[in-house]
Image (tube, rainbow, N blue to C red):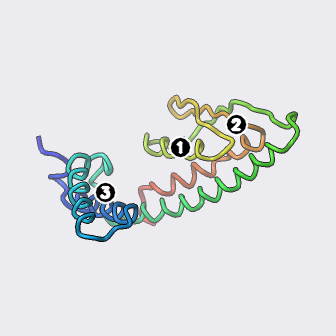
């Protein structure tokens, strides 16, 4: 059986390059010893898991680059939402206890793929005041700390995630 990495050397090279950049950034060392450890580690990880990162390797590299830029843009937006949610939760912490209204919200998402739903669930959970507790098909069950956190589930995350992975060219 032929592996996906063998069928798509360009994707394997892309994965290796991404992993090596991450290695250099996180290690912070550019000496030959650390770079050789990075080369060996990234090579092994690429060989073992290159089919996991890009499940559908029929998508052109150019399209993946567009998705990467959109994903980075989404992460910047999500980081800002996390900051705003932190401020809201901080205000709740200093408010009278009667202002807390925890609730379970049933939320239907239009997202189709498991990865899109995974990204949405993690984005919700990373945002203070909300936690994804269960996913059944396209229904998410989310614990929200108050009405403000619950009202934040307005579909904006869905739209931004769907934009990352849309199939037509921008």
Callout 3: helix, strand or loop?
Answer: loop
Q: Give the x, y percent position of residue 39.
A: 23, 61
Q: Residue at x 20, y 50 (%)?
A: 47
Q: Which residue is mark 3?
A: 59
Name the mark on residue 122.
Answer: 1
* Nearer the camera: disc 2 or disc 3: 2
Q: Residue at x 41, y 65 (%)?
A: 66
In the rendered view of the protein, which quadrant contains the N terminus?
A: top left
Callout 1: helix, strand or loop?
Answer: helix
Q: Which is more N-terminal, label 2 or label 1? A: 1
Q: Give the x, y percent position of residue 138.
A: 53, 35
Using the numbered discs, state the Cα–Cα distance from disc 2 to disc 3 in whole angstroms.
37 Å
Q: Which is more N-terminal, label 3 or label 1? A: 3
Q: Which residue is mark 2?
A: 144
> Viewed as shown, does residue 9 lie left or right of 145?
left
> Viewed as shown, does residue 113 lie left or right of 46?
right
Q: Which is more N-terminal, label 3 or label 2? A: 3
* Nearer the camera: disc 1 or disc 3: 1
Name the mark on residue 55.
Answer: none
Q: Give the x, y percent position of residue 37.
A: 24, 59
Q: Give the x, y percent position of residue 44.
A: 21, 51
Q: Residue at x 55, y 29 (%)?
A: 134
């Amino acid at each position: 059986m032929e592996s996906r990495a063998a069928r798509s050397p360009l994707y394997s090279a892309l994965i290796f390059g991404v992993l090596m950049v991450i290695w250099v950034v996180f290690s912070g060392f550019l000496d030959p010893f650390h770079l050789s450890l990075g080369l060996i580690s990234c090579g092994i990880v690429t060989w073992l898991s290159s089919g996991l990162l890009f499940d559908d390797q029929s998508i052109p590299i150019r399209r993946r680059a567009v998705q990467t830029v959109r994903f980075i843009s989404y992460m910047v937006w999500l980081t800002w939402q996390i900051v705003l949610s932190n401020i809201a939760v901080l205000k709740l912490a200093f408010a009278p206890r009667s202002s807390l209204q925890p609730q379970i919200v049933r939320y239907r998402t239009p997202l189709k793929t498991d990865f899109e739903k995974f990204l949405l669930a993690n984005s919700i959970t990373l945002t203070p005041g909300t936690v994804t507790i269960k996913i059944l098909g396209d229904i998410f069950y989310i614990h929200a700390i108050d009405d403000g956190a619950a009202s934040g589930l307005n579909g904006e995350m869905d739209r931004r995630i769907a934009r990352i992975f849309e199939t037509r060219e921008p």
